[in-house]
């Protein structure tokens, strides 16, 4: 690895690796309207774990929790998992460059099993996967990113986080890593104050360009 500044890259999943956020918005908007009388509920809970959603909005409603869990599992089993433009190529380059990578997600193991079933190549492209059940505190707490760095045995000073949700961006910042925000889910005006750099997608991004972003040099 030599004296490289960037030794590990951590990726959130939904809205960063796969273009799933719009699908989740439809699901959660329906549940919010049906059970809570809330509009645009999907936007309110972006980046939250299921455990966090249940705690904040369905406390003590065990029957509803079971119903939503069953419905969500069926929904995820039928989801379309399409890569964010350029991310697969970027992951492949990082692998060739021997840069360590991780997926750090608010999703659970069952959902990620569906993903890897649809895209077995993705599992081979990352060194570790941190799911929601691996930590006690959800984003915006930095625990998930801290755990990924611990597994990869790398410090925050040599780590880059890619995130799209506001909770996730805050968690990345709190971890001490360099944070690159994506505008796949939220407007640039919301992402920029929470990130060290902002991109629309991964098209044209390379390890060398990422190093330039890290150094705040023109790409």
Image (cartoon, helix red, strand yellow):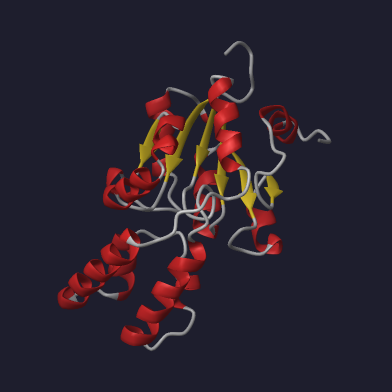
Residue that sits furthest to the top in the current view: 2
Number of numbered discs on residues? 0
- Quadrant in the picture for residue 142: top left
Using the image as rendered, state which of residue 56 and residue 79 is in the foreground: 79
Q: Is residue 71 left or right of residue 138?
A: left
- Quadrant in the picture for residue 119: top left
Q: Residue at x 53, y 45 (%)?
A: 172
Q: Position of residue 59 (x, y in %)?
A: 24, 73
Quadrant of the snapshot with the C terminus: top right
Residue 130 higher or lower than 183, as above or below = above
Q: Position of residue 196 (x, y in %)?
A: 68, 44
Q: Position of residue 62 (x, y in %)?
A: 16, 73
Q: Residue at x 55, y 30 (%)?
A: 92
Q: Is residue 30 left or right of residue 181?
A: left
Is residue 99 visible in the rendered structure shown here? no
Residue 62 higher or lower than 142, as above or below = below
Residue 166 higher or lower than 99, as above or below = below
Q: Position of residue 14 (x, y in %)?
A: 47, 54
């Amino acid at each position: 690895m030599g004296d490289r500044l960037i030794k590990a890259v951590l990726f959130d999943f939904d809205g960063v690796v796969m273009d799933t956020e719009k699908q989740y918005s439809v699901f959660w908007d329906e549940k919010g309207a049906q059970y809570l009388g809330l509009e645009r509920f999907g936007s309110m809970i972006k980046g939250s774990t299921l455990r966090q959603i249940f705690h904040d909005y369905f406390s003590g409603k065990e029957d509803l929790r079971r119903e939503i869990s069953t419905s969500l599992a069926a929904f995820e089993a039928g989801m379309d998992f399409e890569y964010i433009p350029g991310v697969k190529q970027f992951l492949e380059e990082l692998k060739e460059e021997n840069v360590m990578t991780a997926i750090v997600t608010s999703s659970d193991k069952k959902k990620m099993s569906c993903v890897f079933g649809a895209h077995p190549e993705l599992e081979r492209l990352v060194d570790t996967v941190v799911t929601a059940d691996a930590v006690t505190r959800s984003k915006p707490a930095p625990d998930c990113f801290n755990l990924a760095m611990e597994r990869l045995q790398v410090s925050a000073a040599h780590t880059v986080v890619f995130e799209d949700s506001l909770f996730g961006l805050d968690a990345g910042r709190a971890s001490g890593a360099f944070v690159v925000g994506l505008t796949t889910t939220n407007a640039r005006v919301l992402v920029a104050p929470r990130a060290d750099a902002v991109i629309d997608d991964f098209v044209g991004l390379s390890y060398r360009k990422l190093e330039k972003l890290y150094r705040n040099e023109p790409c």
